[in-house]
Each structure stands twice: as C-alpha cells, then as structure tokens.
Amino acid sequence: MFSSGLVFFNLLFQIYLSQVWFYGNYSAGPYKISDNPIFIGTDSVFVGDVLVDREKYAIDYNQSLVTFKEIIADSILVIVKFRPIPFSIQEKYYQQVVVKADSADLTISEQKIITDSISRIREGDLEMIGSKTISVDLSSKQGLGLGQATRIDIKGNLQGVNVWAMLSDAGNPIPAEGTTKELAEFDKIQIKVQAEKFIGYYGDNDYVQSLGNIGTINKKLTGVLFDLNFGNNTTNLGYAKSKGVYKKTGFYGQNNKQGPYYLTKDMNNAPIVPGTENVYLNAKRLVRGQNEDYTVDYASGSITFTNQNIINSFSRIEIDFEYATEEYNRYLILANHEWKLNRNFSMKIGALSENDDKFRNLSYDLSPSDIESLSLVSSESSRVWLSGVKFVGAGNGDYILENNYFVFAGIDSGDYDIRFSYVGANLGDYEYDNSIAGFRYAGVNQGKYVSRVLVQLPEQNRIYNADFKWQTPFGINIDLQGFWSQRKQNLFSENGFNNGLAYNITTSYEKEKYNIRYQRREIEKRFYFPYAGDETDFTYNWQGIRPESLKQKDQLDFEIRPFDFMLLSGGAGWLNTFIHSKYEQYFYGGKFFTRQEYSVLEWKITHYPQTENRYYLNLTPRYKIFYPGFEVFFQDQKDSSHRYLKPSLRIKYNEEIDFRIEADFKETRQPVVKEHQVYKIQASLNKNIISLNSIAGYQINRSDNILENGAWFANIFSRIKPMPGLDITADYLQQQSEMQTVELNYLWVGTGLGNYKQNPETNQYYYDPNGDYVQQMIPSGNFVINDFRKLQANWDFYKWPLVNFDGYYALDFENRGQASLQNTRTNRFLNFSVLPFQKSFSVKITNYGDYAKDDQFLAYAAIRTINNNRIEMNIQKIDQIPLVVSYEHNNQLIEKTDQGIDQKRQDQIFSIKPKIGFNLDFEVLLIYARALISKPLNYSQLGEFKLNKWELAVDKNWQIDKWSNLNTNFSAAFRSALIAQLPYDLNLNEPKGITPQIRISFDRIFDSASFNQVLLNAYYAFLKYPDRKPEHNFSTKLQVNF
Amino acid sequence: MPNDIIYKELMLIDSISFINPVINFCAERNNYILTLDSNLEKIFKIDLNNFQRVETISLPQKISFLKGIASDNIYIYLYSENSLFRFDKIRGEIRSLINPQDRIRIADLALTQQGEIFMSDDLNNRIVYINTLGQMQTFSLSLKSLLIPSGIYFDDAKNRLWIINRAQQQIEAYLKNGNIDKIVKLPSAQFNRIFIAEPDIYVFNKMNSQISRIQDQSMIEYFIPGQKNILNFFIYDSLMLILKPNGMYLYQIDK
C-alpha cells in the first residue's frame, strides 16, 4: 500500500548520522551546523545533555541553521544530531516557498508539489475497489421494497490513459422503471480520464471560466467536460446539469444583528448550492467557518456573521451565490476554443447556453391548458400566478364551490382539488382550519392563503464571446473582447430572444517602475450576464448606481514605484447610465512600506466633483512584538458626512501567544446623528497545557446621542490539560441574532402518513411516528432580536488505570427579546466506569440529564426534564456463565408554563443477561420494567397508574462452518396495567398482553477468485401484538465486493 | 498472553510540527494522511512521501468535541464521543449519521474499503455496524462472552474485523459474518487502539502512551523519546507514524 515511500526511506538510512558539538554564545542563534543541507526531521538537539523538544528550536534545513526560542548561555553545551544530504541541492530543483505564519496553518514551510499525482500511477496498474449491494425486503405491513448501493473507486493506467473514478450512491432505492441510472442520480460521482492530449471529467465538477473584465462563470455542474489540446489549440466542450442559478444581492446590515440574513430569491427563501457563495463585507472577501467570518445555512439560504466582524447599519454586505434549481432541471452546453499564434497573440471564442427543461416542472404539474395560457405570457416575464383549482368530478376532490368560494367537503367528498399558497396575513382569502383539517374561506383579504400557485417560468440564456489579446513589441498590451447575449424568460412564449451586445477594450503599458492602464466598456440595455461581475462594491464606489444600469464606463489607472519603499497610484473614471446621466471620479493615493511590509503608511483620496470627497489613511508601524494600527476614514457629502476611526494594538510575542485589542468608532451625520462603537479583545494562546482562542467585546449603538442598545459578544474556545490523564474542552458563544416567530399548524396528510396524532379527548397534538398529521411552522412576519448563548464543556479523566470518568455538559440559551419568549436547553452526560481487573468484575455508572424550557408556542410552552441513572455490573465469577446485571432509573416530568404538571413518569428497569458457555454459547436476557405514570391535566381521574413489563429473550449464534453463520433470537414480552384503557398521547404504542417476536438471520461468505468477496444475508422476523395482525418481514441482501 | 516483553527504542527519521494542536489523524489510500485540526474546521492532507501538505479541507460548520477522523477515499467521517458525521469533500456537505439521542458512545471506528462502518460502542457493550445500504444495526458476534470493546480495526487484505475486548483482556478477530476467527490474549485491559500489519498486531495504551507489537509469543514495547501525549499511530512498511498534538513523527521499526 505504501511501498513507494519505502524506497525513499531506505535511501535515507544509507546516509550517515552526523553530530555537531558547540557552546552557546549567549544568543538564540542562528547557529550553523553543517555545510550541506539537512534531511527534514532527521535532527535531534540536546542542550546540556537533555533532549530538547522540537517546539523549543527551529532548523532551516536548507541553510543548516538552528535557532532556539530561548537564549543559550555561553557555558552550555549543545549537541545536534542529524543526517546531512551529501550533496548540495541546486536552486532549480529546490522549490521551497516560505509562507507567512498563520494561526490556522502549519508551521512548516510550504513546498510546491514537484511530483504530480499522475506520476504515482504506473502503466498497467488499475486498482479497483468497491461493492455492489442489492436487497429485497418483503413485509406483510409495507409490501415489497428493493434497495441497492453501488460504490466504485478506481485509480490506474490503461494503455497510456490515466483513469480516476469515484462513484457512490449508497442507499438510493431502485426506481420502479429499472436500475439504469443517469449520472445526476448518483449520490456522488467523479471520473477523470487523462491521455496525452485529452482530459475528460464526468460527474460532479466545478466549471470556472474567466471572461476577462466582464466577469467570471463559476458553476457547480454534474455532467461531462472535455479538454482537448493540439499544439497551440485548446478546445473545451461540455454538457451538464447545472445545480443552481446565479444570484447577486447587496444590502446594509442591521444594528445588533449578526444574522441570519436571508439571501432571497425573489420573494421566497431558497436553498443555496453548497460552496457557491462569495461574501463581501465592505468590499473585503470573507471566509466561511465558525472560527472565521461567517456561517451558512444552505437549506434555508441564510448567512450569519461571526463575532470576528460586528455587523451594524454601516456594514455593506454583498453576496453572490447560486440557489438550488427547484422548479426545472437546468442544462448547460458550452464550447470554447483558444488559438495561440505565438507568445504575443492569442484568440479565444466561446459559447455557453443554459436552458430549463420546460416540459418538466418539478414542483407543479403543468396541464396542456396551463401551457397554452403560459404561451400568451410575455417572454420577459419570469413568474406567473396560476389557478390552484382543478375540477376532478364529484367524489374525487376535497372541495365544493359555494357562492364563488370553495368549501372543504371532506376527503374525496367534493368536486375540486385545490392547491393553496401562503401569502401572509391579510393578503389572502383562506385560513387553514385544524378542526376540519382543511382550508376555510375567511373573506376577501381576511386570510393568509390564496387558491392560486405562483409558478416560475422556464428560461434560456445564451452568451457568445470573442477575445483577442496582443502583446505588442513596444510593451503595450491590447485586449479586445466582444459579447452577445440572448435571453428568453418564458420558453413557452412564441416571442423570440432578447438580444444584447457588449464590448470591452483594455490597453496597458507596463515597465518596472510604473504602469498605466485604460479600460472602456459599453453595454447595451438588453445585454444580460447572469454570472459574477468583475467589480465588487460597485454601488458604493459609484455613489449608489446599480451595476445593471451601467451603459458605458471608462477607467484610467496608473501606478508609479519611484523607490523600493514607495508606491504612488491614481486614476479617473467616467460613467454613463441608461438614463444618460454622467458621473465621474478621480482618485490618488500612495503607500510607504519597509522591507517585508513590516510597517506601512497608506492613504487614498477619492474626489467626486461637486458631490463628495472620501479620505482614507491607514498606519501600521511595527516595533518588535508590538503592532499598533490606526485607520481613519472621512466621507464628506453635500448634506451629510460619515467617518470612522479604528485604533488597534496587537502584541504578538511569538506564534503561540498573540493578543489584540481594538476599537471601532463609526459616525454618520445626516438629519439624524448615528453612532456605532465596538470594543474588542482577541487572544490566542497555544501552550502545551492550555490552548485558548477567544474574541470578546461590547457594542453600542446611539441615535441622536440617545443609547439605542448595547450588547456583549464573545467566542471562547479553550482546551486545558492540567495534568496527564485529564482533558477538558470548553466552548462558549454569545451572539446577537434575529429570528422570525413562527406559528404552529398541524396538517392532516392521511392515516399513518404523518408523524403527529390528535388526542380526540383534548384535541391536542402529540408526536407519533405513525401519526396522521405533519407539523407546519408558518412564519408570522414578526421579527425579534435574539440574545443567543451557548456553552459546551467536555472532559475525560483517565489518569488511573482502572477508572475512567468522562462526560459533557451543554447549555443553549435563547432570549428572544421578550421576557415570555425564551428557550433554554441543558444536556449532560456523565460516565463513570471501573474497568475489569482480573476479569471478574467491572462496574459502569452513567447519568444522563436533559432540561428543556420552550416558551415559543404559548399553547405548548413547557418545561421538560429527564433524569436517567444507570448502573451496570459485569460479573465473571463463573467462567462459563458471565453475567451482566443492570438497573436503570428514569424520571420524566413535563410542566406546562401556565397550567402546572402535565405528565410525570418514573421508570425502573432491572435486567439480567447471563451468557451460557459450556459449548452451548447462547445469551439470555431477562427484563422487568415498571412505570408509574400520572397525567393530571388531561386524565386526572386515572390518578397515578402503573405499567409492568416482563421480557425474556434468548439469542444463539450457530456457527455452521467458518463461512456460514445462523443467528436466532426469540423473545416474548408480557405487558400489564391496572387500568382498563391506556390513555392516548403517552407514546404507549405497545398494548397489554403477550407480544412474541422471532428473528432469524443467516450470513454466508463466498470467497471468490473473480471478486474480493461475496456476502449473502437472509433475514426473517415475526412479531405479533395482541391487538393486531401478525407481522412477517423477510429480507435478503447480496453484496459483491471487488 | 505473550510470554516475553521486550523493550526497544525507536529511531526518529522525520517529523512535522503544527501550531494549532491536532486532534487525530487517519490514513488515506496512496500514501496520504489526513489530520484533524483542533479548530475543528480544517483538515490537512499530507503526502507521506515528502511530509508536505497538499490540501487544506475546510469544513462548512463547526462540530464540537470531535475526537476522530476516518476516510474511505470517497467520504471523510468525523466522530465525537456520541456523534458521527459524513463529510462530502466535493460538495462541501456534512451529514449527521449518529447524534447524541442515539445514545451510542463511539470508542473507536473502522471503515472498510466498501464503505461499511464498524464502531465500538462501549456504553452498550456492542459493535455497531452501518452496512453499504446505510442501515445501522448491532453486529452479531458468534463469541458469546462479555464484550467491552475499545480499539477496532478492519483489515481489508484479509477481510477480518479486529476488536480489543477489555472485558476478556483479549483481541478478537471476526469474519464479516460474525464468526470468530482468532483470539489473541493481552497482558492487561488498558489498550485503546489496534492496528494490523500482517503478521503483526500493534496495540496502543492511551494511559501510558505505550505502543506495543505482538509477535508470536512475545510482545515488544517500544520506547519513543518524549513518549507523552501520543494520540494515535499507524504502521506502513517498516515505519511507524505517531501523532502527538504538536506534531507527527516518523520512526523506523527495527524488526
């Protein structure tokens, strides 16, 4: 498996071990230890005869220099042992790039990968690993079911063609029409085929194409892409299913709200294709991650900023992303060709088309009459309301028509099937009525639902481009680009495409000390480019002009570097929009910096004639371990001004200890003075016994000198190892976020098809996996600010050989800005175990607790408490009859916020599990369980009642031969209660009486010459509840491993 | 139980150090190692041929208290004491396979090349198995003796599941049908991890950071300089790779 590494390391051992002795010179170094470079990691350093940990020194393996973290006194003997490379490495082979120290990074330098992964594959090698599994399930309750899973992992070389393939569709059911799958139906697929002049990509791939100054196409695709290379010609072709549709949004943040900010697709939230988002805050690109800048909830399509950047009404947020295509499959066809005449001249042409599959709406079944009516809708419309009413004939629908509105008549008791859409309070005519499990007419604009459906129309976009690049002999570079777009927003419409043209001209002249660049862009109004543009923060840079209104732009920029420590820059821009207004801007700035950019002075002035001036200054001097910073900005407009000041101080003692304190003052003076202040401390400490990464601070928002709000925020992650054998980790988060309150609704979906049931006596709903209702959470439109706090701690104690003590504690707290709306949940788990000594006895004690307080829905507001204790003893006094004895005590309490105790339950479970040896080898399980239950709110007449359960199970493995195994399990449970009728909604799905159960499982392995292994499993189960028909389940599974 | 205990000092031949402490690592096909950073949002892929990082994989969300990582070359699995997640690198998605409500305590985890998952559940004294169809069940073992599983390893070359059973102070090897194939006695119950490099069995005792090799009737206890805080190890060819929070160290095993 790892044979290629062996050669390298065998070679290493043939090289002698060198040793150098020297005395310190009262400095940390560097000390030269060899004339030759050193093999990485072969060093051992002894200071005063003590082996020094590698954390205490660093070795430059190229220059053979050792540098200590502490000063070495002149009387201390240092011994360094290492293996030198017996020749000098020539510069051209040594591609080592020093990377800046990054707390999230490795300390080592980053070496470019000289050996491409292709060279790992030898000709003739083809390694294929995987499996195919087919299963058949036959159940008396659920009928016939088929399942399959395919998994292939291939890497190798066949007749000069390298092949990589990964394919997995674990758990996808076999469709009724057969087992042939389209690429897109696999859970995961990626295939790469590479020959001398050809690369083919199949399956999931990212497609990135730069269209120069107009933007970039970056899409996640499932399909095929080909790259062909013939000398100076390169062609790529592709046909794929697009996973999403590009969308760009920009907005200002809100005070005291880190998120979630929903990236809306028109009016609705939509899932985002994972990994497609690019998030910018004040034109700075942010990084995803809880410890970085933001997190994304791809399912709901929202982002939340971490405490690294405190969001307020001054924060300019710009996000581009792809939302998941939910209504049509979208297909993409692309073709590009590039011709390089020589180093100085190249030409590129390309075409790309994206179109929706108009014949298959995935969320709404379009009838021929719908399509006919849609063909009359303009080709420039993208959404349209269609009637949700369908006449299906008497007794086939759920609704009847009365007085021009629809009335619920009962399931299959009406003439119409109707689809209702939620539109918001007082915007619709209907309400959902739980009492009839259907929609009820509420009056015009008196409800939240309408009997219509908003349908997205299928669209098609095409873009053609041509690009000529010429590097003239005089140092002038010329780039000409032309674009032609075609768009049709309604593919049902008989109207043609909307055509649009655009061009871009860029010329530049570059010399060592200076460069100058001119760019002109002109766009026709109907030109449409549904991908990321090249300029972020366009609207802010051009005083509120939206990018889509750009008609013509000219830009001239220059840079001069008169000295190594100085950079001067400047430029001008002129812009026309489609309403013919003309805008212009001029800017000039500069930068002074010392070597390695340790200290920097940077400034920029932007002038918008007669309207605005912007001034920016940033000073970051550095002295030893001190990194002070001073950033100031002033924006002066006709009738308002805006400014911010950002002083900071960072003390970076070394890579392990890093401390930063900063303040951020922002102020805007319009008719109303608004102020925003943030004070923040950041600390990072990474030592052997403690690791700490934290941000904490306070923010203040004022309006006209009146305090609007202030809030604390914090992210603290710590890991402490105070002594060997004890690990403690703790994670604390406090953040301001916003949430929309929701209303609970229960929708009847059919007998046994939902997961909630209704108690006919109290009309309340309770969870039941075989229920008739589903729970719907309807957004109310009311938003409240949330103070969200989360604390988690985890520890593991294993210092003593026989004792282990570990556990975790988690606390989530949400205060929704109103005293009556808050959620708290604590969860803990403690485990104490004494491990076996002399194998005869061991004991395990666990405690599990859960406390949940939920005031979100007043009708259901409750505190739920669970406390579970369990003790288990393993006894092996008699060698052939080892025993497991356990006792479990479980308390459960539900208290309604305004009504008192709703349910009280106490469970006690005794079990004894002897295993019988003496060549019989079977296992017996005997359980006695007792439950004391009371439900005073709904069943006060029952008082406290008792349930009993006795259960006996016998389990035996019959090892027929080495390759065959039969497992049999028989169990019988007897349940009794002193009350005649068990109440509803207690999750007591198992009735009184005797319940027998039999399970038989057979496993057979076939070792095959053709395959790695074939595994066969057959399973039969029988179950008979006293009040139901017997259940029989049979399944068989065949797994072929190769 | 091994009759002799031999002590051997290993020679360091290469190392790599980290700024952020590392939680755990795992091997991937073709000489790669994945390390799980303590920030719990980053995975580094390291080439064993030159000990250089070739890829940084960012997780889309933070998962608290992760303790292990495993890779079957198609998916990356991440687990804590009571949770298991599957990470799809290409799509950047994380799916939860086991959550705390399942009341499973994952002492160790092993993957097969076919994508099956075996877990030692020492809270419930059983081996939890997720098959190729994604169905989770208790793996039925033919040996009906008390089981407190800790380390677990699947040997793809021989299709054997190896389990350290602390209750019996032994290592048990099973076929995929649950039939017992081999039992190897251990001198104590304190071993947490197991690695098979036929014909040798390597075990690790977390308590004293001791890695040992079981060979015939003897046990070789390796002495590793600066032995404290060893988190994990694995063997390839005649080399042993050891993970500590601050770095990864490669030693020559003197056979």
Image (tube, grey):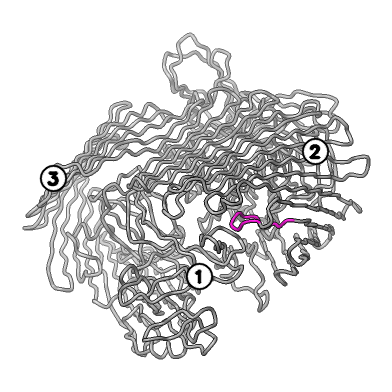
| Chief SS of the magenta region | loop
Q: Position of residue A815 (x, y in %)?
A: 37, 45
Q: Position of residue A36 (x, y in %)?
A: 53, 30
Nearer to the camera, A1017 or A902: A902
Q: Which mark is residue A704?
A: 3
Q: Amino acid at mark 3?
A: Asp
User: Is residue A919 in view from this perspective?
Assistant: yes
* Label 1: element kind: strand
Q: Is residue A710 above or below residue B10?
A: below
Q: Is residue A205 above or below residue A175?
A: above
Find disc 1 in the rendering and name its residue. Answer: A230
Label 3, label 2: how far apart the Cα atoms are: 73 Å
What residue is at 58 percent from the left and 37 percent from the top? A829
Q: Chain of mark 1?
A: A
Task: Specify start and end residues of the magenta stretch as a single range.
Answer: A982-992
Q: Residues within 10 Å of mark 1 (few under 14, many from 20)?
A: few
What is the quadrant of residue A119 in the picture? Answer: bottom right
Q: Nearer the viewer, mark 2 or mark 1?
A: 2
Q: Residues within 10 Å of mark 3 (few under 14, many from 20)?
A: few
User: Is residue A156 in view from this perspective?
Assistant: no
Label 3, label 1: how far apart the Cα atoms are: 68 Å
Query: Furthest-top residue in view?
Result: A75
Q: Amino acid at mark 1?
A: Phe
Q: Which mark is residue B146?
A: 2
Q: Amino acid at mark 2?
A: Leu
* Label 3: element kind: loop
Nearer to the camera, A766 or A545: A766
Inspect the magenta stretch and tell me whether residue A991 lies in it: yes
Q: Is residue A191 above or below residue A491?
A: above
Identify the mark nearer the N-term, 3 or 1: 1
Q: Residues within 10 Å of mark 2 (few under 14, many from 20)?
A: many
